[in-house]
Amino acid sequence: MNDYKMFQVSTLQALMLGYTKSVITVEELLKHGDTGLGTFEDVDGEMIVLDGHCYQAKSDGTIYEADGKTGVPFCAVSFMNTNSEFDIENVSSIEDLKQFLDVAIDEAFALNSMHVVRVDGLFNKVMARSEDGLKSRHVELKKILENNQQDFCFENIKGTLVCVYFPDYMDGINAPGWHLHFVSADRTCGGHVFDIDLKHGKVEFSRISTIEIKFPATAEFDTYALKEASDKDIKAVEQGK
Protein backbone atom coordinates (compact mmCIF):
# COMPACT_ATOMS: atom_id res chain seq x y z
CA MET A 1 0.00 0.00 0.00
CA ASN A 2 1.27 3.51 -0.76
CA ASP A 3 1.68 6.18 1.91
CA TYR A 4 -0.04 8.92 -0.05
CA LYS A 5 -2.37 10.96 2.13
CA MET A 6 -5.78 12.49 1.86
CA PHE A 7 -5.72 16.18 2.77
CA GLN A 8 -9.07 17.42 4.01
CA VAL A 9 -10.23 20.89 4.99
CA SER A 10 -12.72 20.95 7.90
CA THR A 11 -15.42 18.25 8.18
CA LEU A 12 -18.63 17.43 6.34
CA GLN A 13 -20.62 17.90 9.54
CA ALA A 14 -19.29 21.45 9.89
CA LEU A 15 -20.21 22.26 6.28
CA MET A 16 -23.66 20.68 6.63
CA LEU A 17 -24.35 22.81 9.72
CA GLY A 18 -23.27 26.02 8.03
CA TYR A 19 -19.55 26.60 8.59
CA THR A 20 -18.83 27.99 5.12
CA LYS A 21 -16.03 30.45 5.91
CA SER A 22 -12.62 30.17 4.32
CA VAL A 23 -10.14 27.89 6.11
CA ILE A 24 -7.34 27.98 3.53
CA THR A 25 -6.90 29.36 0.01
CA VAL A 26 -6.94 27.48 -3.28
CA GLU A 27 -3.25 28.28 -3.70
CA GLU A 28 -2.43 26.56 -0.40
CA LEU A 29 -4.78 23.66 -1.12
CA LEU A 30 -3.00 22.74 -4.35
CA LYS A 31 0.22 22.16 -2.40
CA HIS A 32 -1.51 19.14 -0.84
CA GLY A 33 -3.05 17.38 -3.83
CA ASP A 34 -3.73 17.40 -7.56
CA THR A 35 -7.06 15.53 -7.58
CA GLY A 36 -10.18 15.90 -5.45
CA LEU A 37 -13.34 17.85 -4.78
CA GLY A 38 -15.05 20.27 -2.42
CA THR A 39 -16.63 23.71 -2.44
CA PHE A 40 -15.68 27.37 -2.05
CA GLU A 41 -16.24 30.06 0.56
CA ASP A 42 -19.96 30.76 1.11
CA VAL A 43 -20.68 27.59 -0.95
CA ASP A 44 -20.02 29.60 -4.11
CA GLY A 45 -20.04 26.70 -6.57
CA GLU A 46 -18.71 23.15 -6.73
CA MET A 47 -14.96 22.44 -6.71
CA ILE A 48 -13.25 19.98 -9.03
CA VAL A 49 -9.48 19.49 -8.64
CA LEU A 50 -7.93 17.63 -11.54
CA ASP A 51 -4.38 17.42 -12.92
CA GLY A 52 -3.25 20.05 -10.43
CA HIS A 53 -5.86 22.63 -11.45
CA CYS A 54 -8.78 23.81 -9.32
CA TYR A 55 -12.03 24.48 -11.19
CA GLN A 56 -15.09 26.32 -9.93
CA ALA A 57 -18.46 25.23 -11.31
CA LYS A 58 -21.02 28.04 -11.32
CA SER A 59 -24.78 27.69 -11.01
CA ASP A 60 -25.27 27.52 -14.80
CA GLY A 61 -22.85 24.58 -15.12
CA THR A 62 -19.98 26.60 -16.59
CA ILE A 63 -16.56 26.22 -14.97
CA TYR A 64 -13.59 28.51 -14.50
CA GLU A 65 -10.15 27.98 -13.05
CA ALA A 66 -10.39 29.30 -9.50
CA ASP A 67 -8.25 32.23 -8.42
CA GLY A 68 -5.49 31.18 -6.02
CA LYS A 69 -6.74 33.59 -3.36
CA THR A 70 -10.25 32.11 -3.30
CA GLY A 71 -11.23 30.72 0.09
CA VAL A 72 -11.95 27.03 0.77
CA PRO A 73 -14.22 25.91 3.66
CA PHE A 74 -14.33 22.19 2.83
CA CYS A 75 -12.58 19.80 0.44
CA ALA A 76 -10.67 16.54 0.13
CA VAL A 77 -7.66 16.18 -2.19
CA SER A 78 -4.72 13.86 -2.76
CA PHE A 79 -1.93 13.39 -5.24
CA MET A 80 -3.10 10.81 -7.75
CA ASN A 81 -0.97 7.68 -7.59
CA THR A 82 -2.62 5.10 -9.83
CA ASN A 83 -2.26 1.58 -8.44
CA SER A 84 -4.90 -0.11 -10.62
CA GLU A 85 -6.99 0.71 -13.67
CA PHE A 86 -9.84 -0.83 -15.67
CA ASP A 87 -11.83 -0.17 -18.81
CA ILE A 88 -15.62 0.02 -18.45
CA GLU A 89 -18.55 0.49 -20.80
CA ASN A 90 -22.33 0.83 -20.81
CA VAL A 91 -22.82 2.01 -17.23
CA SER A 92 -26.34 3.42 -17.24
CA SER A 93 -26.62 4.99 -13.78
CA ILE A 94 -24.57 6.39 -10.93
CA GLU A 95 -25.71 3.52 -8.72
CA ASP A 96 -24.33 1.01 -11.23
CA LEU A 97 -21.03 2.90 -11.32
CA LYS A 98 -20.81 3.00 -7.52
CA GLN A 99 -21.49 -0.74 -7.41
CA PHE A 100 -18.68 -1.34 -9.91
CA LEU A 101 -16.30 0.79 -7.82
CA ASP A 102 -17.38 -0.97 -4.61
CA VAL A 103 -16.68 -4.39 -6.13
CA ALA A 104 -13.26 -3.24 -7.35
CA ILE A 105 -12.11 -2.03 -3.93
CA ASP A 106 -13.70 -5.02 -2.18
CA GLU A 107 -11.76 -7.42 -4.41
CA ALA A 108 -8.60 -5.47 -3.54
CA PHE A 109 -9.38 -5.89 0.21
CA ALA A 110 -9.58 -2.11 0.49
CA LEU A 111 -13.07 -1.24 1.80
CA ASN A 112 -11.58 0.34 4.92
CA SER A 113 -9.16 2.53 2.99
CA MET A 114 -9.85 5.89 1.35
CA HIS A 115 -9.70 6.17 -2.43
CA VAL A 116 -9.43 8.84 -5.10
CA VAL A 117 -10.63 7.66 -8.50
CA ARG A 118 -10.86 9.30 -11.89
CA VAL A 119 -13.08 8.07 -14.70
CA ASP A 120 -12.19 9.47 -18.12
CA GLY A 121 -14.74 8.67 -20.78
CA LEU A 122 -17.56 9.44 -23.15
CA PHE A 123 -20.86 10.05 -21.44
CA ASN A 124 -24.32 9.83 -22.96
CA LYS A 125 -25.53 11.89 -20.03
CA VAL A 126 -24.25 13.57 -16.88
CA MET A 127 -26.83 14.97 -14.46
CA ALA A 128 -25.23 17.53 -12.18
CA ARG A 129 -25.74 20.63 -10.08
CA SER A 130 -24.00 23.67 -8.72
CA GLU A 131 -25.01 26.76 -6.78
CA ASP A 132 -24.42 30.44 -6.19
CA GLY A 133 -22.78 31.57 -2.98
CA LEU A 134 -24.66 32.82 0.06
CA LYS A 135 -22.93 34.84 2.76
CA SER A 136 -24.38 33.36 5.92
CA ARG A 137 -23.72 32.17 9.43
CA HIS A 138 -25.09 28.92 10.84
CA VAL A 139 -27.35 28.43 7.82
CA GLU A 140 -27.47 24.70 7.06
CA LEU A 141 -26.11 23.53 3.72
CA LYS A 142 -29.46 21.98 2.74
CA LYS A 143 -31.12 25.40 3.19
CA ILE A 144 -28.49 27.12 1.05
CA LEU A 145 -28.93 24.53 -1.70
CA GLU A 146 -32.73 24.74 -1.55
CA ASN A 147 -32.46 28.42 -2.47
CA ASN A 148 -29.37 28.55 -4.69
CA GLN A 149 -28.94 25.15 -6.36
CA GLN A 150 -29.42 24.73 -10.10
CA ASP A 151 -29.58 21.38 -11.91
CA PHE A 152 -28.37 20.75 -15.46
CA CYS A 153 -27.76 17.90 -17.87
CA PHE A 154 -24.75 17.45 -20.16
CA GLU A 155 -25.28 15.10 -23.12
CA ASN A 156 -22.89 13.29 -25.48
CA ILE A 157 -19.89 14.73 -23.72
CA LYS A 158 -16.31 13.69 -23.04
CA GLY A 159 -14.94 14.39 -19.61
CA THR A 160 -13.74 13.16 -16.24
CA LEU A 161 -15.47 12.09 -13.07
CA VAL A 162 -13.46 12.78 -9.94
CA CYS A 163 -14.60 10.30 -7.30
CA VAL A 164 -13.66 10.28 -3.63
CA TYR A 165 -14.43 7.36 -1.31
CA PHE A 166 -14.51 7.33 2.48
CA PRO A 167 -15.27 4.16 4.49
CA ASP A 168 -18.33 3.92 6.73
CA TYR A 169 -16.42 4.40 9.98
CA MET A 170 -15.37 7.90 8.87
CA ASP A 171 -18.98 9.09 8.70
CA GLY A 172 -19.16 12.72 9.82
CA ILE A 173 -15.60 13.50 8.83
CA ASN A 174 -16.78 13.05 5.26
CA ALA A 175 -19.69 11.32 3.55
CA PRO A 176 -19.31 7.53 3.64
CA GLY A 177 -19.19 5.92 0.21
CA TRP A 178 -18.64 7.67 -3.10
CA HIS A 179 -18.86 11.41 -3.87
CA LEU A 180 -18.54 12.41 -7.56
CA HIS A 181 -17.88 15.64 -9.43
CA PHE A 182 -17.52 16.10 -13.21
CA VAL A 183 -15.47 18.31 -15.50
CA SER A 184 -15.71 18.25 -19.29
CA ALA A 185 -12.68 17.43 -21.41
CA ASP A 186 -12.62 20.98 -22.80
CA ARG A 187 -12.84 22.39 -19.25
CA THR A 188 -15.95 24.44 -19.97
CA CYS A 189 -18.60 22.78 -17.78
CA GLY A 190 -19.03 20.58 -14.73
CA GLY A 191 -20.52 20.21 -11.27
CA HIS A 192 -21.62 17.85 -8.48
CA VAL A 193 -22.89 14.62 -10.06
CA PHE A 194 -26.08 12.79 -9.06
CA ASP A 195 -26.59 10.58 -12.12
CA ILE A 196 -24.68 9.43 -15.21
CA ASP A 197 -24.95 7.30 -18.32
CA LEU A 198 -21.46 6.29 -19.40
CA LYS A 199 -20.83 4.88 -22.88
CA HIS A 200 -17.21 3.86 -22.25
CA GLY A 201 -14.24 4.96 -20.20
CA LYS A 202 -11.12 4.20 -18.19
CA VAL A 203 -11.08 4.05 -14.40
CA GLU A 204 -7.94 4.79 -12.38
CA PHE A 205 -7.77 4.00 -8.65
CA SER A 206 -5.49 5.60 -6.07
CA ARG A 207 -5.64 3.96 -2.64
CA ILE A 208 -5.01 6.26 0.33
CA SER A 209 -3.76 5.12 3.74
CA THR A 210 -3.31 8.40 5.63
CA ILE A 211 -5.44 11.47 6.30
CA GLU A 212 -4.53 14.99 7.43
CA ILE A 213 -7.35 17.32 8.44
CA LYS A 214 -7.01 21.10 8.56
CA PHE A 215 -9.59 22.36 11.06
CA PRO A 216 -10.81 25.95 11.15
CA ALA A 217 -8.88 27.98 13.72
CA THR A 218 -11.72 30.36 14.64
CA ALA A 219 -13.65 30.44 17.91
CA GLU A 220 -16.87 30.20 15.89
CA PHE A 221 -15.97 26.69 14.72
CA ASP A 222 -16.09 25.53 18.35
CA THR A 223 -19.74 26.63 18.67
CA TYR A 224 -20.92 23.88 16.29
CA ALA A 225 -22.25 20.56 17.60
CA LEU A 226 -20.62 18.43 14.95
CA LYS A 227 -22.87 15.38 15.01
CA GLU A 228 -26.22 17.11 14.48
CA ALA A 229 -26.46 16.81 10.69
CA SER A 230 -28.66 13.81 9.93
CA ASP A 231 -27.86 10.95 7.57
CA LYS A 232 -31.08 11.81 5.72
CA ASP A 233 -29.93 15.38 5.08
CA ILE A 234 -26.47 14.24 3.98
CA LYS A 235 -27.97 11.76 1.50
CA ALA A 236 -30.38 14.40 0.18
CA VAL A 237 -27.50 16.83 -0.44
CA GLU A 238 -25.41 14.10 -2.09
CA GLN A 239 -28.25 13.06 -4.41
CA GLY A 240 -29.00 16.62 -5.47
CA LYS A 241 -32.45 16.71 -3.87
Image (cartoon, rainbow, N blue to C red):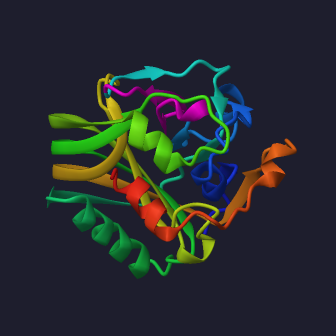
Q: Is residue 57 magenta?
A: yes
Give the residue at x 33% y 53%. Answer: 241
Query: Considering only vertical position in the picture, is 207 above or below 187?
Result: below
> In which quadrant will I find the N terminus?
bottom right
Image quarter of residue 5: bottom right
Query: Considering only vertical position in the picture, is 104 above or below 18?
Result: below
**Residue 188: % across, % down:** 32, 22
Disc tally is 0
Q: Is residue 152 left or right of residue 16?
A: left
Q: Is residue 226 left or right of residue 112?
A: right
Give the residue at x 63% y 34%. Answer: 136
Q: Is residue 78 visible?
A: no
**Residue 54: % across, % down:** 52, 30
Q: What's the magenta region?
A: 40-60
Q: Which of the pair 208/63 is nearer the observer?
A: 63
Query: Considering only vertical position in the picture, is 87 above or below 159?
Result: below
Give the residue at x 64% y 20%. Answer: 68
Q: Is residue 64 magenta?
A: no
Q: Is residue 68 visible?
A: yes
**Residue 115: % across, % down:** 51, 61
Q: Which of the pair 136/35 is nearer the observer?
A: 136
Give the residue at x 26% y 59%. Answer: 94
Image quarter of residue 89: bottom left
**Residue 177: % across, % down:** 45, 67
